[in-house]
Amino acid sequence: MSFIKYRFSSNVLRMDTEVNVILPDSQLKQGGRYPVLYLLHGAGGDCDSWMRNSSIERYAKKQELAVVMPSAYNSCYADMVYGMPYFTFLSEELPYRLENLLPVADEPENRFVAGLSMGGRGAFLWAMRRPDFFKGAACLSGSLDIAAMAERMKAEGDQSALKRFHSAFGPLEELGAENDVYHLARKISKALETCPKFLYMCGLEDERYEEQFLPFLSYCKEIGLPMDSLDGHGIHDFDYWDWAIQQAIVWMKHLE
């Protein structure tokens, strides 16, 4: 595998940023491209999080999969109310810049997205707002109901997390439809022929299992949105996510 750290000046963010890319070493036919996984980090992380804390390079090598890991910091992968337009950067600038630079897939049949925690929510947000862009999207331990998570953060006195939500979304009672995964899920459930496949995973010992995972699966069943799911023992940490991303990659490779 080849590892590339690509630093560039983003036109959308109006600042320098960086992305890590893993590329297989298998030989391509002329003009060929590798299937690509856009892999998103969680809150407090950056483009190095997956490389430092998991064996993603080994898993990607086994499946001959390119992996793109951008930095979005604590943006919630949104066009922030008080901050940078990270969703626009992620969905409009980054893929096309990389597709013109590297042999990564430029068609939805070979594009995938996944992420952990904040990045899991970001993966679903991206795939639901751009349903024609990916073949599959996997959310690992993501909090899809921001209001429920905010109530827990208030109870725990986690002012830092609440400030992060406010910076990204503004007042939570005014959360826009473009950042509401529940709203987006209902919207795409009415056009299933054009939407990607979805996988939601969460550890059984993660407090998000009952707060987030089970309610969203129930909601998807109610609205008729197919949602693959997988649980397993684990909490909200890389011991679980390292296992979970292996399962997600295998799931992606077997999508019809």
Image: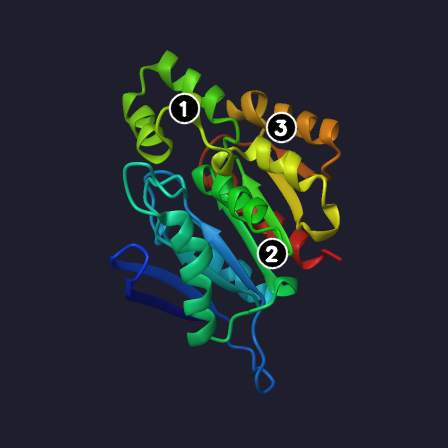
Q: Which residue is drawn at 41% across and 68% down?
A: 97
Mark 2: amino acid: Phe
Q: In this view, does 83 lie above or below 29?
A: above
Which quadrant of the view contains residue 128? top right
Q: Name the residue under label 1.
A: 172
- Mark 2 and mark 1: span between their CA atoms? 28 Å
Q: Which colour scheme is used?
A: rainbow
Q: Which residue is drawn at 43% across and 16% down?
A: 151
Work out how far the residue at label 2 is from the one at label 3, CA to CA, in angstroms: 21 Å
In depth, the one of 140 and 179 nearer the eye is 179
CA gap, disc 3 and disc 1:
19 Å
**N-term mark: 3 or 1:** 1
Residue at x 44% of width, y 58% of height: 92
Q: Residues within 10 Å of mark 3 (few under 14, many from 20)?
A: many
Label ID, residue 216: 3
Q: What amino acid is found at the position of numbered circle 1 in the picture?
A: Leu
Q: Mark 2 points at which residue?
A: 134
**Label 2 Cα crowd, 10 Å radius (few <14 / some 14-19 / many 20+):** many
Above or below residue 249? Residue 149 is: above
Front disc: 2 or 1: 1
Proximity of marks 2 and 1: CB atoms separated by less than 8 Å: no
Q: How many labels does the image show?
A: 3
Q: Quadrant of residue 164?
A: top left
Q: What residue type is labelled 3?
A: Phe
Rendered location of residue 39, percent (x, y): 48, 53
Whole-percent x, y for residue 38 in the image: 49, 56
Instruction: Give the structural element (helix, strand or loop) at label 2.
Output: loop
